[in-house]
Image (cartoon, helix red, strand yellow):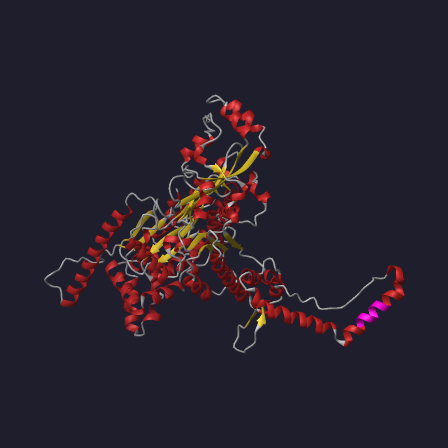
Amino acid sequence: MHISKLNLVNYRNFQNATVCFKKGINTIIGENGSGKSNLFRAIRLLLDENMVKAAFHLNEDDFNRGIGSWKGHWIILSLEFEDISHDEAIQALFLHGAAVLGGPIGKATYNLIFRPRKEVRLRLSALAAGDSVGLANILNKLDISDYETIFTGRSTMDFSNRADYIAVVGDFENVIFPKETEFSVLGCKTPSYLSLNKEVCFTFIQALRDVVSEFHNNRTNPLFSLLKSKSGDVAPAALAPIVKMVGDLNASIEQLDDVKLIRSDVYKTIKETAGETYSPSRLSIRSDLSSEAEELFQSLRLFVGEGNDGHEGTINELSLGGANLIYLTLKLLAFKYQKEKKVLANFLIIEEPEAHIHTHIQKTLFDRMQYSETQVIYSTHSTHISEVSAVENVNIIGQGDKESEVYQPATGLTVPEIGNIQRYLDAIRSNLLFARSVVLVEGDAEELLIPILVKKVFGVSLDELGISLINIRSTGFQNVALLFHDKRIRKQCAIVTDLDSAIINTVPLVTDIDATKKYKEKCAASEKSGLERKVTLDAFAAGNPWVQVYYATHTFEVDFIQCGNAELISGLVDSVYVDPATRAAAKAELLSGDKALYGKRVLTMATQEGKGWFAIKVGGYVNWKTRIPNYLIRALVLTHRRFSSEIIANMMKYRLEKFAAENPGDADILSLDLRVEKYRNDGADFHGLREQYKTKFTSDIFNEFLAVLA
């Protein structure tokens, strides 16, 4: 049996979200504050026997803020299970508690519903349609104590369907409430003696935990739990010799001369000080080493060696990573033992397993952890772990203003498409799945230079903007960009590529020498490929609001000079060429303004140095006056889309500080600076601020950024 689905309705970060799970290992990815811990808490409320009963009665803060007032609304947490065993005892449990009726049980649901009590629901059902005054009177008097928590099974309602929710709970906007107060689609209430959390083995491992302390506590010590679970299987005859040895050892200790002497002296001293009346009648000193198997096991400790010096130390001597690794291993082994005892299922929920575990161990551990007996669900910020996660088993939480959404990146993909994505994630260590928005580029030059350009020119990093730059290292963008779709990851993705338009007239002339003919043919072939690529990519992105394509007219290097960076590139000539004549010719070509000349020269330099190394050299010359090609500005702005007034103010402030350093005491700059601070605080009058900046700095590159924001 395994969890196949979790529905969260109006719970904390989630207004209406569905999380899909598969057998084996499942990965939850999401930025801080997106709701990963809340998702785990929802599962724990349904399955974790260690959750205190008080936690089941939720409160106002548990409602999603996006619904407005919580009053009258319901919270629904629903787990769906698949592959229910045909074992008679298991079938009986779900027939009484959590399954859909009819035939052998293969799928079942188990739900926590937090709703107004029946008397409140009756008052709502009596309202006439549109009676907003009557609704306000009921809701104003409503308190969280008017709510109840019930557990149900055998539900048939699609909790992710908003229309179904309204049909059961009511339409608050139009004041239309159902006349009934109980609905069979919600399932039957499960009796307390059939609580599912008593029938499964469930463990939650928190990210920030004191593993050493847990080993010292018999209640939480995973080693003791293993020994205890096995001790019941040990035959009494096998324990008899040990029990006899313990008894003999205890007796031998008691008969030691020093022990008998101290016992006599203690007893005599008590008599002398307290008197006969108040002294104990008997006193002995003896070993309390138990002969009970469970208590004997409590005295056992785990000793582990991490180095090559042969030393084995206790858990508290281990590194944090070593202790965490041992702890996790013992938990997995415990689940194997539980399976032998015929529990319904084993569930292991791990919050950020990368805490205190070395990156190489992370990747190896989760690549090799394949236990059919246990379903593992973990959250992670680690790209090392996500690389070895099956993309079909990944859920991504996207954070919105008032609610979080959950995406399954493999939804609707074919087996070959999933295979391509999986191989890409395995081969390239990227933060593709963790991004708020993504820019896909085709080569090393863009990967290396774009982050430098943004930081040097605008004063902010791509990380601050929430943009992840991913180098595809080819023009096969579709293989990765197909992840960004209404059915999959609903985040913005920009494809940035070259049109490779020819920088010369490619029409052959009879006067062309062989070298010129070959060069023209090469340019024409590149242009043809670029146009074909554009047709393919435009068709791929058509109708998909999550993917846009942006083109360099020629190539990144040529367009970089064309937008106004000829002086910068000419400064690299001496580091590329040694011959004085070649240096002079190269600088003249780069500064000529003739695209045919500077284009050919910059591409020659990039090829000679290697595009990656050439980009690194260019990066060393980039400064706040460097120009950024417009297609890149559009890609960055339109992909990120939502720039806060704080970010815009920081960028403009950065530019103003640079100008002020060159023009100290400039009154216009001081006026702009004051207006920027006002905009930062109230976010108002963006257009007025933009026009004042443009008037002062007519040709500044930041105007192109501000223009795209409009």
**Is residue 103 or residue 4 the one in the foreground?**
103
Find residue 299 and report its horizontal and vertical position in percent: 62, 66
Locate residue 190 relative to residue 100 in the image: left or right: right
Residue 216 in view here: yes
Identify the residue shown where x is 37% and y is 66%: 617
**Is residue 394 or residue 670 the one in the foreground?**
394
264 inside magenta stretch: yes
Image vertical order of residue 481 relative to residue 325, above or below: above
**Is residue 40 or residue 516 the one in the foreground?**
40
Residue 704 in view here: no
Locate residue 192 relative to residue 458 in the image: left or right: right
The residue most toward the bottom is 309
Locate residue 207 relative to residue 624 in the image: left or right: right
The residue most toward the front is 237
Magenta span dominant secondary structure: helix
Image vertical order of residue 25 relative to residue 55, above or below: below
Find residue 544 and report its horizontal and vertical position in percent: 31, 44
Residue 455, image quadrant: bottom left
The residue stretch that appears in magenta: 262-268
112 inside magenta stretch: no
Image vertical order of residue 416 relative to residue 148, above or below: below
Q: Quarter holding the C terminus?
A: top left
Find residue 57 and report its horizontal and vertical position in percent: 57, 40
